Amino acid sequence: MSKGVLVDITRCVGCGSCEVACKMWNNLQYKQSVQDQGSGLDAENWTVVNRVETEKDNEPVWRFVKYQCLHCEEPACVSACFSKAIRKTKDGPVVYDVNLCVGCRYCMLVCPFNVPKYEWDKTFPQVRKCQMCADRVHAGESPACVGVCPAGALTYGERNNLLAMAKEKINGDSRYIKHVYGEKEAGGTSWLYISDIPFETLGFRTNITTTPLPHYTESILGLTPAVGLGWGALLTGMYVYNRRRNEINREEKKPGKK
Amino acid sequence: MAVSNRWRFTMTPTRYVLMVLGLVGVLLMVYRLVFGLGSSTNLNDEWPWGLWIGFDVLTGVALAGGGYSTALLVHIMGIKKFSPIARSAMLTSLIGYLLVMAGLFMDIGRWFNFWRPFVSWGYHSVLFEVFWCVSLYTMIQLLEFGEVATEKVQKRWHGFFKKIMPVLLIIGVLLPTLHQSSLGSLYVMEVGKLYPLWWSMLLPIFFLMSSFFVGPAMVTVETMLGARAHGHRPDLGVLQSLIKVSGYMMLVYLALKVGDLVYRGATGLVFTGNMEGNMFLLEMLIGVIIPIIICFTPKLRNSVGGLVTFGVLVVAGVIINRMNVVFTGMADFMGGAYFPSVIEWLVSIGLLAIGVLGYLFIVENFNVLPKHKHEHSHAPTPNVVVKGKKAVKYSA
Ligand code: SF4
Ligand code: SF4
């Protein structure tokens, strides 16, 4: 069964422990990068906690949004990769294998959540993003970030259970927005979010299609063999027909024949 | 056939300039391969695809479409009156694809891994189809050129190449049809990101159709340029009927475009006066509507000026279209900023220069252009101008 993480935005205090845990577990560099705009993810920042200043009931409030790869149920990046360098494991994490990667960066272009980043300063760069600590998850442990969260904002478990838990929470508490982000977005993601502030205010992309992205191209790619065969047969037919016709023409034009 | 055995390459000032540009391009390509994308391009996490993919690959493949459309018309549908331009169109296409491959190679981050998709099949990716088709088609085109090449070198192979031509030709029309459309499918995945004036489930069909109708336009431009350079008069009749093929295709394209916008309720976006709307209008006006008018007004179509304008506009229109899909239409979602670096420009220009030089070399040494010019080549005159005059007299 596929695992996931539920993020309760109302509980996050923005301490950044998860960022540090991620760096330590994945051996990432510490960089003094400013995270005022956009997601703030980059090759060395696989997860970020963005501070959002907004209003609730006419009072100014802060919210902290942990962001990372959402580990889609049917990931666009996996279906876009033409060398199978990205794949989704049975446990849920979407992982990257540098040995197969060609570096076309199509995965970066298709991700609806703008997640994969690139090592632009390297001669042979890698695509970098959260791997959901796949080896830990595989061993039955939670991802590094979840383990260190002191505020109880992150819950790790079966995606199905998390979804049920999330629904129970938002329906039983009037503060919450009645939407589990990640339930249907891009066909569903392993990471789920609940919040008391509308998701678009928090910088989430909310107009995402609920059809899994791979379905769009699958419907087209599925036509390829038929189109290829049909068109090939037609071309061959035309070619043979026209050659025959030309031969006949030539025969008739030959002197000595009437 | 009258192909002399000697190799010729007349150096002119233009060719010196092209050579310098080509050389600079090659040096910078080496630099890029050694130091990586980050130090040679302005690409970044917001803009992972830039000039090399957008122009060299996506636009390049479309413009190289002249080869398969001509092959279809001449060799498969057997329309003999177009045959004078067939070899030249197919040669340009071959060179175009070689440049595309070079551009692609420049753009991939881990270039030593370029062969991976041949063994690790990500077959659910559109890019996989593009990759296979483009590589195979380039090979097929090289083999097709074998028929021309063996008229001069390795002559004993000529019979063999002649024999396999039919198969090559059929595959050589089939493959481009598949990958021209898959280039459009690449952006179907950008649902909700690519501006609605361009995003459509019909993208593959639009890409396919435009790559087909830009073919005759490219051939027209090339023929006119070639005619000027070699001082002979182009066969206007052939070009006129050829662009009519484009014209009809463009009518259907226009109708489909409008229908698609109406169907998706995006018509309102056309006239909002924003960047996207204006670029879309520009693309349609320059690249489709004006050319259609030229094409179906006999007076315009029958004039040299009209033909040249048609060719240039359609080519420009397709370039603008591909740029709009890659840049204009994505800008809103991507944020950030991207403008190609000097190195990116110089590499692209260098590749083009090498392509032109290659074309000129082959045209001068092989039997590619319509025969009336080559009647003279077995008695080469050192003076190009004199040769040009003769040619005019001959064809007039
Ligand atoms: S969020 Fe993006 S990178 Fe992560 S699995 Fe989904 S498509 Fe892939
Ligand atoms: S950049 Fe690498 S991982 Fe991403 S799609 Fe291309 S080959 Fe696959």
Image (tube, rainbow, N blue to C red):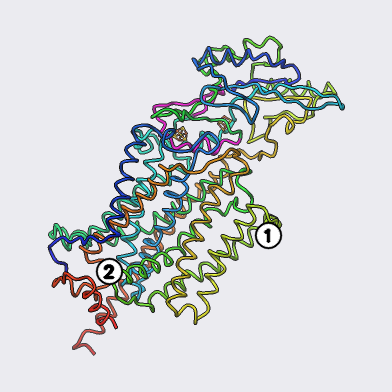
- Note whether B88 is above or below B196 in the view shown: below
A246 in relation to B273, above or below: below
- Tag 2, which secondary structure? loop
Q: Nearer the viewer, residue A104 or A55?
A: A55
The C terminus of chain B - image quarter: bottom left
For marks 2 and 1, give the CA distance. Answer: 45 Å
Mark 2 residue crowding within 10 angstroms, few (<14) / some (14–19) / many (20+): some
Q: Pointer 2 and pointer 1: residues touching (CB < 8 Å)?
A: no
> Residue at the location (35% across, 38% down)?
B118
**Could you tell me if residue B143 is visible in this image?**
yes
**Magenta span covers which residues?**
A87-112
Give the camera-side residue of A75 and A51. A51
| Residue topped by disc 1 | B262
Q: Chain of mark 1?
A: B
- Taking depth in this image into account, of B230 and A140 the one nearest to the observer is B230
Residue of label 2: B369
Above or below: residue B89 compared with residue A106:
below
Residue A141, percent across and down?
Answer: 57, 11
Whole-percent x and y of residue B64?
A: 39, 57
> Residue at 59% across / 30% down in the picture?
A72
Place of residue B57 in the rendered image (x, y in percent of width and height, measured from the top left): 42, 48
Q: At which x and y percent is residue B97?
A: 35, 52
Q: Name which residue lies at 31% across and 49% down.
A: B22
Quadrant assignment, res B193: top right
Q: Which mark is residue B365?
A: none
Residue B1: tell me if it is visible. Answer: no
> Which residue reaches farthest front?
B13
Residue A109 magenta: yes
Q: Secondary structure at mark 1?
A: helix
Q: Is mark 1 within 8 Å of ligand 1?
A: no
Which residue type carries mark 2?
Leu
Amino acid type, mark 1: Val
